[in-house]
Amino acid sequence: MESYDWTGILPTSLKFGVTGLLLFFCIACGERDGKKDIRDYYYPIRQLEDGLVYEYRPVGNDSLPPVYWYYRSFIEEEGVFLTATYYEHDLIPRQLAKEEMVSNGVIQNDLALFVTDSTGRQQPLNTEVLAGNVFPFKVSEEGGVFLYKIKISSPDEPHLVTTLIKNRRYTGDSTYVFKKKKLPSVEFEVKELVELDDKEQGGMEPQWQGREVYAKNLGLVFYEKQLGETPLTYALFDRYPMTVLEEKFKQLMSRENTYEQN
């Protein structure tokens, strides 16, 4: 498997300390010449050292709220890492992930999921990353499928286990317009399977198909999931520092308080 020199990111004295971490993409082992290098289409590590919020808004469905992801990169002796925190309109974190850049892609090392209980408090779920393949660096249209798989259960309902299996397949190049600028992009076909294993009532396996678009030097800019007859579609609307999102939240809370007083 081909190694990658992160000299452009790491300080010169560090070079690349994670060359040996070749855990990524057992399907893609044995890379051959002719594959497209798409590492520049993932989230830009240098731009994210101070952290940026990615605001995604629904397409074709104004009733859905925007969602927010806060990305921050860390360039350390042990390697290059990216944290991703997911928020909804109430600015309560519901997902926290830690990713690592290895020689041929990005792997997810840790994942924390949270649910809000009846008292409004955040409760963590039990999560286990079984296959953390997030994004490949070398692809071809004739290439294989990149597997992501996690297992989730609740401390309150240990008999109910959910396994999410997501397969990504590179389908080709395209262009994407963001803020009136046309950018090179790459597209992936996504297939998801959710295995619901209920030891008390049996199981079920809903499936979905979708599409993801990654723009050069931006990362994920568009995603779509087919849920029955209605697609769930979101597109990148803007990027800004966390202070901007915090101000949005303050304004929202102020409007809600004013409404309650009236």
Image (tube, rainbow, N blue to C red):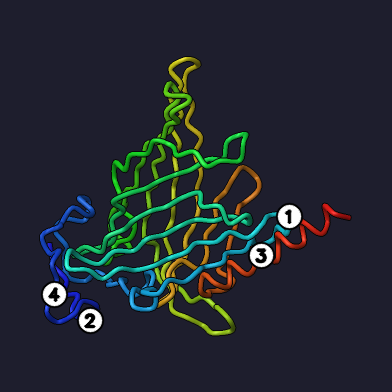
27 relative position to 158: left or right: left
Q: How far across and how far down the image is residue 160, in percent?
A: 45, 25
- Label 1: how many residues lie within 10 Å, few (<14), some (14-19) or many (20+)? few
Amino acid found under the numbered disc labelled 1: Ser
Answer with mark 2 or mark 4, whichever residue precedes in sequence. 2
Provide the residue designation for mark 2: 8
**Residue that mark 4 sits on:** 14
Mark 3 residue element: helix
**Mark 3 nearby-residue class (10 Å; few <14, some 14–19, many ≥20):** some
Q: Which mark is residue 250?
A: 3
Label 3, label 2: how far apart the Cα atoms are: 38 Å
**Amino acid on which the number 4 mark rests in the picture:** Leu
Q: Are marks 4 and 1 in contact (CB under 8 Å)?
A: no
Q: Residue type at mark 3?
A: Lys
Residue beneath label 1, please?
63
- Tell me the CA gap for discs 1 and 3: 22 Å
- Mark in front: 1 vs 3: 3
Q: Residue at x 55, y 78 (%)?
A: 178
Residue 16 rendering spot, x and y as whole percentages: 14, 71
Q: In percent of the image, x 32 and y 71: which residue is there?
A: 38
